[in-house]
Amino acid sequence: MDLFLNFPLWFALTAIFFAQFVKVPLHFIVTKKWDWSLLTSTGGMPSSHSAAVAALSTGIALQEGLGSPLFAVSAVFAIIVMFDATGVRRQAGEHAIVLNQLTSDFQRFIEEAKDWPEKPEHEKRDELKELLGHKPVEVFFGGLTGIGLALILYYFLNL
């Protein structure tokens, strides 16, 4: 039953669920609309990927020490994930926005050119996911979320 005693793993999983859940009230505060689909979506504030890898690294640091090779591996892993969240995945989201606009413009052109039969827009095309990556501030707060949760959980579990 070592799995149930793997605190860094549980810190990381808790950070994922917490970061995903907190996106809903944060979105409500900004938009005054409840969007429960944020519980399972990518992107948004805070980054659950960043929270997870930061909590994992923090848990390993607390359990194994900052000088351990396992902490070094987890820290490099965290840096790569966070860099990817603000770089490649964010750019993929930006490309999706442009592609969705091109698709929309093309659809409008076809409608005007050929008397396109009236159909609901969702039947004409499926949009690409635009909210894939994170802004740097979202990654930063995701990282802080993970570190903070890991420290709080570690403190309460070791009282």
Image (spheres, rainbow, N blue to C red):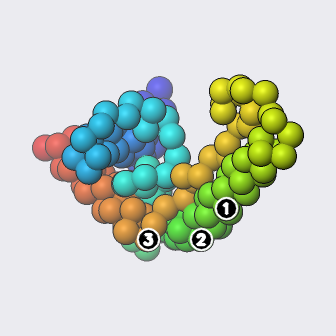
Give the quarter of the image for residue 77. bottom right
Residue at image position (84%, 46%) is 113
Q: Which residue is mark 3?
A: 136
Q: Residue at x 39, y 62 (%)?
A: 138
Is 112 on the left-hand or right-hand side of 25? Answer: right
Residue 14 in sight from this viewpoint: no
For this rendering, which residue is in front, 140 or 127?
A: 127
Residue 87's disc number: 2
The amino acid beneath tag 3 is: Pro
User: Dot 1, how many residues are within 10 Å of its Cα: few (below 14), some (14-19), or many (20+)?
Assistant: few
Residue that badge 1 annotates:
98
- Judge from the rendering whether residue 142 lies leftward or rightward of residue 158; answer left or right: right
Dot 3 or dot 1, earlier in sequence: 1
* Amino acid carrying mark 1 in the image: Val
Counting from the top left corner in percent of width and height, residue 33 is at 30, 37
| C-alpha separation, residue under disc 2 versus residue under disc 1 | 17 Å
* Viewer-proximal residue among 149 and 30: 30
Residue type at mark 2 is: Gly
Tell me if residue 79 comes above or below residue 126 in the rendering: below
